[in-house]
Amino acid sequence: MLRLILLYIIGSVLLWSCSTTEQVQPQPNPWTIKTNPVTKLSGYKANTGGSVVQRGGDVVISKGVCWSRTQQIPTINNFKTIDGAGNSDWSSIIDSLVPQDTIIVRSYVVTGIGTFYGQAEGYRVKIQTSPPSVQTNPVTDARKTSALLSGKIVTDGGANLVERGFILTNTTTQFTQKVQVPILNPDSLDASFDTIMPGLQSNTTYEVKAYARNTDFTSFRYGESRFFFTNGNLPDPFPVVFTDTLMIDTAASSLDSVTAKANGFVFSNGDFSVLSKGFCYGTSRNPGYYGSRTDDPSSPFNPNVDVKIIGLVPGLRYYYRAYARNEAGIGYGEEKSFIAIP
């Protein structure tokens, strides 16, 4: 009986020992991740990313790269990008860098059992910049008094753009004007840009050059010259509108405020339906849509333009013109003027 008890005790000890040994065995990393080399992008940005060399048995919840500005190896608790989920390769863009910034980058994947990292890559942001490079696209849609101008930023030179647009020259009169195109997002290359240029002379040859300037250079860089002809037989894409009469509404005016009634007419809708119409006015020449204006409340399909302009200052000279707007742009009628005498 004593022998049986001893055998039971020894067997239990061996079984417990084996079980304990199995539990403390380290688990191998089921994922192997690779970090892509870090390369420079324009505007002090860097491109990198990663790939899954060996996958585990669970699902990638999120993936990207993490980085630090110290010698510390980064984790997802530092700066990071989030570039989707799944096991496919991914590309990552690191922005908000500054010249001579030194960073350490490594890729990561977050799975159901934990986070796994690729190898660390060091990178130093280069300070060298250059002027932007810009091209002028051919003008393929020149109309009676307008043309669609377009260009492309080939490279911003490694610094953010601050201005872009076109230099337009009437080859008959040699009159030159600069047409600036707004930069909607200074941190983006925003490569292609265009604008519809109204107010051109009919049956005239023009020269156009795209231009651009970045933050590190004060001088402009230009694209090649392109020439186009405004064909008087092709109607303009935006509306054609006529400024008709304006009369002081004596019944509604006073010594402090003048009200006027203005009339016009939309001759042509252009390439698109009219979205709005009315009158622009002001004490300076060439009043425009984004200044003081009164919109006609009637249907845009009604060609008549009839508005009341209220709140005019007695004794001042005002300039006014009818307008109509469609998807292509804004058409203006002839500019006229009057003195606001109640």
Image (cartoon, rainbow, N blue to C red):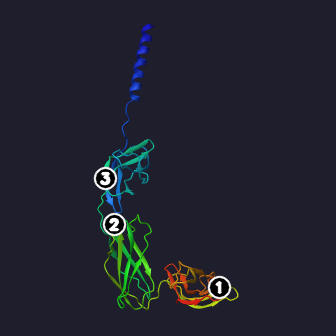
Of the pair 146 and 182, the residue shown nearer to us: 182
Extreme-top residue of the structure? 2
In this rendering, the count of numbered labels is 3
Apparent side of residue 307 relative to residue 152 in the rendered image (left or right): right
Specify which label sits upstream in the sequence, 2 or 3: 3
Q: Do the residues labelled 1 and 3 touch (CB within 8 Å)?
A: no
Q: Where is residue 339 in the image (x, y as percent from the top left)?
A: 59, 89
Pointer 2: residues within 10 angstroms few (<14), some, or many (20+)? some
Pointer 1: residues within 10 angstroms few (<14), some, or many (20+)? many
Of the pair 92 and 293, the residue shown nearer to us: 293
Name which residue lies at 39% across and 69% down: 162
Which image quadrant for residue 21? top left
What is the spatial separation of the Cα atoms under label 2 and label 1, in whole angstroms?
51 Å
Q: Is residue 137 visible?
A: no
- Which residue is tagged 1? 259
Q: Where is residue 251 in the image (x, y as percent from the top left)?
A: 70, 88
Q: Where is residue 29 in the image (x, y as percent from the top left)?
A: 36, 40
- Which residue is tagged 3? 123
Apparent side of residue 261 relative to residue 104 in the rendered image (left or right): right
Apparent side of residue 340 relative to residue 79 in the rendered image (left or right): right
Position of the N terminus by quadrant: top left
- Which residue is tagged 2? 216
